[in-house]
């Protein structure tokens, strides 16, 4: 598990190391223009959407470790090629390889965590993963920012070469991991990997969780660097330095609060924790509304805007030990890779649609933007409560099974309330 956490941190470090500087590199340093730079960012999302449906089946059939190693080699080749590419075609092909590799890393690493954890330790394992990812993203972005020089192509070639080396180092680390066989979960229905997507879509609880996941990522992560930042600059008059402070406040909240929050959520119903996050994010959107529409002083607007990002971070810290373990507990034996890939696909869809919808609204339709995403946050609360009716007692309240193995698989025939 320690090696897997090192892998999560290194993969996040590689992402934070280069992605913030892709636009500048392609548009200005390589002189390929804003259109090509925008296409590169789009290719990242498209590549992920293409490979993720196949990644789940590969993880089920081959196991997560071989798939992860293949993804790491692909990403390393993509990163190295991106640093050397001099024309639009080469840049787009390299970005596709890097984007595809990074997309597959997520469900593969998540499945390895599932296989190396128990119902008792899984929430803490995913909380640690989220903590290390955010810490490594911030460190990667900080170091990368000090290495690049827009007047020298060689500085970016070095940047992408280091990223490729990090991925290859991770190949070596992951090659030493010996995966245990995931134990059969008591009460799980007999199943095989052949069910695939049809079996997943027949799991009502998983389908509801995917819908909920789309709304979660659309209303939060999909707005961070698009709609919400545009709203802050245009409506609230937030400076770029204050925007950076807000993003730092989000990361700081996650890093500082993650394990304190974990103690709180470990003995709470997962569906109720998700519902509570919707209410917290609703407060965040109201705070953002005050920042841009409250007609207070600039200092108060800036404080409110920074608080908005901090509140989002609090919700994220509550979700990390809740949603990912729930995906694992909904999966029948041997299907964790398929379920993790499906949820990663939903996340990528939300991250692709979120900026496209939120960006223009945040920049020009200030009040409708706040109202729309306030309603989405309240919708998270409603969906969280409804999801609880589809979960077994063990899936919704895993601490009840501390001395036995959690039941995994299909949705219950009766609601939790009846079982209780």
Image (spheres, rainbow, N blue to C red):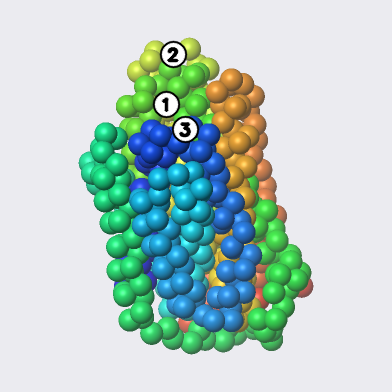
Q: Which quadrant: the C terminus?
A: bottom right
Q: Secondary structure at mark 2?
A: loop
236 vs 395: above or below: above
Query: Residue 27 vs residue 162: left or right?
Result: right
Mark 3 to mark 1 CA distance (whole Å): 36 Å
Query: Residue 137 vs residue 210: left or right?
Result: left
Identify the residue at image location x=60%, y=27%. Answer: 360
Q: Secondary structure at mark 3?
A: helix
Q: Position of residue 23 (x, y in %)?
A: 43, 38
Identify the residue at image location x=38%, y=15%. Answer: 298
Mark closer to the observer (3, 2): 3
Q: Report which residue position mark 2 lands on.
A: 296
Mark 2 to mark 1 CA distance (whole Å): 10 Å
Identify the residue at image location x=42%, y=26%. Answer: 304
- Name which of mark 3 and mark 1 comes first in the sequence: 3
Mark 3 to mark 2 CA distance (whole Å): 39 Å
Q: Report which residue position mark 3 lands on.
A: 33
Q: Report which residue position mark 1 lands on.
A: 304
- Name which of mark 2 and mark 1 comes first in the sequence: 2
Q: Secondary structure at mark 1?
A: helix
- Asked which quadrant contains residue 173, the reply is bottom left
Q: Position of residue 359 (x, y in %)?
A: 56, 31
Q: Which quadrant: the N terminus?
A: bottom left
Identify the residue at image location x=48%, y=87%. Answer: 181
Q: Are marks 2 and 1 in contact (CB under 8 Å)?
A: yes
């Amino acid at each position: 598990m320690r090696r897997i956490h090192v892998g999560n941190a290194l993969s996040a470090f590689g992402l934070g190391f280069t992605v913030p500087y892709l636009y500048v590199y392609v548009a200005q340093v390589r002189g390929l223009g804003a259109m090509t730079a925008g296409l590169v960012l789009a290719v990242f999302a498209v590549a992920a959407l293409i490979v993720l449906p196949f990644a789940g089946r590969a993880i089920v059939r081959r196991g997560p470790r071989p798939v992860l190693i293949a993804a790491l080699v692909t990403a390393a080749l993509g990163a190295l090629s991106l640093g050397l590419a001099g024309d639009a075609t080469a840049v787009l092909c390299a970005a596709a390889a890097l984007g595809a590799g990074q997309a597959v890393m997520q469900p593969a690493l998540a499945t390895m965590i599932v296989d190396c954890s128990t119902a008792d330790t899984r929430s803490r394992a995913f909380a640690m993963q989220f903590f290390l990812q955010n810490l490594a993203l911030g460190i990667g972005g900080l170091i990368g920012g000090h290495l690049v020089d827009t007047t020298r192509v060689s500085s970016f070639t070095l940047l992408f070469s280091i990223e490729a080396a990090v991925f290859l180092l991770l190949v070596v680390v992951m090659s030493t991991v010996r995966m245990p066989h995931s134990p059969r979960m008591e009460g799980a229905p007999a199943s095989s990997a052949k069910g695939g997507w049809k079996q997943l879509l027949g799991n009502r609880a998983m389908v509801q969780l995917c819908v909920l996941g789309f709304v979660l990522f659309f209303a939060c992560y999909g707005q961070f660097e698009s709609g919400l930042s545009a709203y802050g600059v245009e409506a609230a008059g937030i400076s770029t330095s204050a925007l950076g402070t807000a993003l730092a406040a989000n990361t700081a909240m996650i890093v500082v609060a993650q394990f304190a929050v974990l103690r709180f959520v470990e003995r709470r119903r997962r569906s109720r924790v998700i519902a509570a996050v919707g209410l917290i994010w609703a407060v965040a959107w109201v705070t953002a509304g005050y920042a841009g529409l409250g007609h207070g002083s600039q200092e108060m607007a800036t404080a409110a805007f920074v608080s908005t990002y901090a509140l989002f971070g609090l919700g994220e810290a509550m979700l990390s030990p809740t949603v990912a373990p729930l995906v694992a507990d909904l999966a029948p034996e041997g299907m964790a890779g398929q379920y993790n890939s499906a949820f990663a696909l939903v996340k990528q869809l939300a991250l692709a649609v979120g900026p496209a919808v939120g960006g223009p609204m945040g920049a020009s339709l200030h009040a409708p933007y706040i109202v729309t995403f306030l309603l989405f946050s309240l919708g998270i609360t409603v969906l969280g409560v409804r999801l609880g009716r589809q979960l077994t007692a063990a899936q919704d309240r895993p601490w009840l099974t501390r001395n036995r193995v959690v039941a995994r698989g299909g949705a219950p025939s009766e609601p939790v309330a009846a079982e209780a």
